[in-house]
Amino acid sequence: VSAGHSHGHHGADLHIPAPLARTLLFSVLPFAVIVLVGLAVLWPRGTGPNLTDVFGGQTLLKATVVSVEPHVCAGAEGSGIDDCQIVRVRLRQGSHRGDVVRLEEGGSVGPAIHLGEGVVVGTTTDGGSRTYYFADYDRDFPILLLAVLFAGAAVVFGRMSGVRALAALAASLVALVWFVIPSVLHGHSPIAVALVGSGFIMLVVLYVTGGFNTRTTVAVLGTLASLALIAALAWFFVQATKLNGLADEDAAFLSATAASVNLQGLLLGGIIIGSLGVLDDMTVTQVAAVWELRRANSDFDAPALYRAAERVGREHISSTVNTLVLAYAGASLPLLIYFTQSNLHVRQILTSEVIAVELVRTLVGSIGLIASVPITTALAAYVVTRPHVEAEPA
Amino acid sequence: VFRLLRALVIAVAVLTVIGLLALWPRHGVEKLNSDGGALPYVKATVAGSLRLRCTDVEVDLPTSCTEYRVHITSGRDRGRSATFRVADTDFSVPTIHTGDRVVLAFNRLAPAAYRYSFEEFNRSSPLLLLFVLFVIVVVGFGRWKGVRALTGLAISATAIMFFLLPALLNGRDTLVAALVTTSVVAFAALYIAHGVTRTTTVALVGTLLSVGLITALAGIVASVANLSGLSDESFQLLRVTASALSPRGVLLAGIVIGALGVLDDVTVTQVSAVAELNSANSAMSRRDIYRAATRIGRDHVASTVNTLVLAYAGASLALLLFFFQEGRSVGQILNREVVAVEVVRALVGSIGLIIAVPVTTALAVAVVTDDAS
C-alpha cells in the first residue's frame, strides 16, 4: 500500500526496472479490453422481465406500532382457543401518511410485535376497502448503524487503504446490482456475465485498494490466472456432477418467472463471484509479503524470497482450507440440521444436489486459491529481484 | 507476555472441555420417519427412453411422459431392468440422458409403472474425483502443512456434524453450543495445522478475542434488527420437526462459525508475517516490525472487506435476482429478512476481521521481541 512512501528501512523503496513494469502492464491490458468489450456487449438494455403484476402490485409502507392489545381468538386451523393480538400502527409513508390503521391478524403463529417498533406494512385494495397487514420489521436503522460501524473500523484501522477498500467494495456492489443481476435477468449467459463482472470487480478492487503500480499489477496477473482455473474447474465439475441449479428454491422459482435464465449458468456464476473475494485476498497478501521481505532484507535473491514468502503462504493456505468450508457451512446451518434429522445415509446426503452444490463450490474455490499462491509468489519474487538498471530505459 | 497468553489459552481449553462434556448430546436424534425419507434408494444407469401418454399423479390429468428404461446397479434387484416415468409437467426433475447414472426411490406399494421414481443423479464419482484433486493440491503445495490442514478440517467437520448438530437437536443452548464448537474448531484448526508453537498460541488468542467480539456484535444486531432466523426455508421445516430449537440462536451460530474460517486466516498470517520479518532482519525494533506487519495486514484487510461480501453474494445470487425481478427498490430489498441476514453476516464478520489485525499483530510483536531479549 505504502510502496510509494518512505517507510523503507534501507532508505530506498523497491525499484522495478521500467521495461519489466511495462511488460507486466501490457500483459494485463488485453484482459482489461476484453472486460470493457464484454461490459458493452452484455449491458442490460431496455426493461427486463418484471414481476410486479404477478405480485398484484402490493404497496409496502413504513409504520410505527402505536398499540398492541392481546385478545382471545380461534386457534389456527380450528384447533381451539388461542392468544392473538390486535395491532394498530401509524403510517409514516404514502398518501394516508399519519393515519392510524389496524392490521389484519396473523393469528398466534404471527411474529411478535411490540409497542413502538418500526414495521413495514403491506396494503391491498379489495374493491373499495383498503386492508393493511404486517409485512416485515423496519430494519433500516440497525443495518445503517452496523454499516457505519463497519466503515468506521475499516477507516480507523486501515487509514487510506481502508478508505480505498470501501470504495472498491462500493464498486463491487454497484457492478453486482447494476450490471450482473439485470444482465442475467435479460437472458444473457450468466457465465459470461459473471466472468466479465468479476473481471471488472477484480480490476477495480485491486487497483483502487492497492494503487496503480507494479505491485498491484503482479497481484492482478496472479488473480487472473487463478480465476481462469476456478472457472474451468467449476464448469467441468458442475457438468460432471449434473448440478442443474434447481435445488436452490429461489432459482427454481426463477425458472418459472424468468424462463430465459440459464440456471446451471447461474450456479457457475455464483461460484466464480463467490471465490473472487478470497482470491484477491490471497494474491494481495502474497505480493505484500514478498515486497515487505525484500524491503526488510535486500540481500534476498528470488529463490530465498520465494521460500520465505511461501512459508507465509503455506500458513495462509492451511487456514484458507477452513475459510470457505466454514463460511458456507455457517450459512447453511439450518439446512445441515435438517439433514441430520432426516433418515438419510451420509453418502446420500452428500450427493444430494443441495449439498453437492456447496461441496463443489467449496472444493473448486479452495483449489483455485491454493494454486494462486505459488503462481503469485513466484511472479512477485521474480519481479522484485530483477537487477535495477541505472541507465535510462531504452 | 507469553505466559499470560498461555494461561488464557489453557483457561479457554478447560472451559471448552467442560462445555463439551456438559452439552454432549446424550439422546439419539429423533429421526423423521415420514414421507420420502423412509423409501429405499437404488442406483441405476439409464439405458433408453420413450415418450408416452400418462396421468399426472398430482392433478389426475392426462399429460405427456417420458419413460426411462434403467439397469439397476445396487440393492436386491441388482442386474435387473426397470422403468420409471417423468411427467412433462413435473418441473422438479431435470433433463435426463441415456447413460446417466441416477438414484431412484423404490416404493413397493405403488402401481407397477410408478414403483421407481427419480430421486437424484448419482454424483458420487465426480464428487470423489474433485475431493481427491483438492487433497492432492493441498498436500502437493502445502506438504506437511497441507496434511495437517486437512486433519484440522476433518476435526472441524466432525465437531459440526457429531457435536453441534446433534446437540442443537437435543435442545441444548444454541449460543453456548456454537461457542464450544467454535473453540474446538479454532484449537484444532490452529494447533493441528500450524503446530503447537508460541506463534500459534498468539494467533489463537487473537482468534478467540475476535470470536468473542463477533458473537457479542451479532447478538446485539440480531435483536435490534429483529432478525428472527425464520426466513431460511430449511428453518421453517425445522420449526415443525424440531420445535425446541431457537431460530435466532441458529442464525447467530451460523454467523459465528462462518466468520471463524477467515478469522483464523487473518490472525495466522499476521503472526507468521511478524515472525518472518523478525528473522529476516533481527535488528528491527518493535515499532518497525509492527509497522511492517501492519502494512501486510492492511493489504489483507482491504481485500478481506470484499471476501465475505462476495462469498455471501455469490452464494445467494439466485435470491438477489429474484428480488430484483420483483421490482422493489434497493432499500426495500435490503430490509427483507433474507437479505438483511446476509448483510449482517458480512458486516459483523468483517468488523471482527478488521479488529483482529491490530490486536493479533500487537500480541505477536510483544511475544517475538520478548523472545529476542
Image (tube, rainbow, N blue to C red):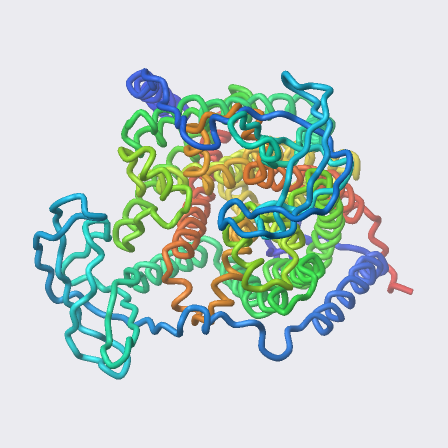
Quarter of the image where one finds residue A178: bottom right
Front-most of residues A36 and A189: A189
Front-most of residues B85 and B267: B85
Q: Residue at x 19, y 49 (%)?
A: A108
**Residue A246, relative to residue B115: is it above or below?**
below
Q: Residue A85: percent from the left, percent from the top?
A: 13, 56
**Residue A120, relative to residue B371: is it above or below?**
below
Front-most of residues B260 and B5: B260
Front-most of residues B302 and A323: A323
Q: Residue A74: percent from the left, percent from the top?
A: 14, 51
The N terminus of chain A appears in which quarter of the rendering? bottom right
**Residue B221, relative to residue B156: is it above or below?**
below
Q: On the rendered structure, is B18 left or right of B48?
A: left
Q: Residue A36: percent from the left, percent from the top?
A: 73, 70
Q: Residue at x 41, y 26 (%)?
A: B33
Q: On the rendered structure, is B325 left or right of A16?
A: left
Q: Is residue A122 visible from the viewing direction of this image?
A: yes
Across the whole image, how many numbered discs are drawn on residues? 0
The C terminus of chain A appears in which quarter of the rendering? bottom right
Q: On the rendered structure, is B307 left or right of B100?
A: left
Q: Residue furthest right?
A: A394
Q: Residue furthest bottom?
A: A95
Q: Residue at x 73, y 65 (%)?
A: A35
Q: Is residue A320 visible from the viewing direction of this image?
A: no
Q: Residue B90: percent from the left, percent from the top?
A: 58, 49
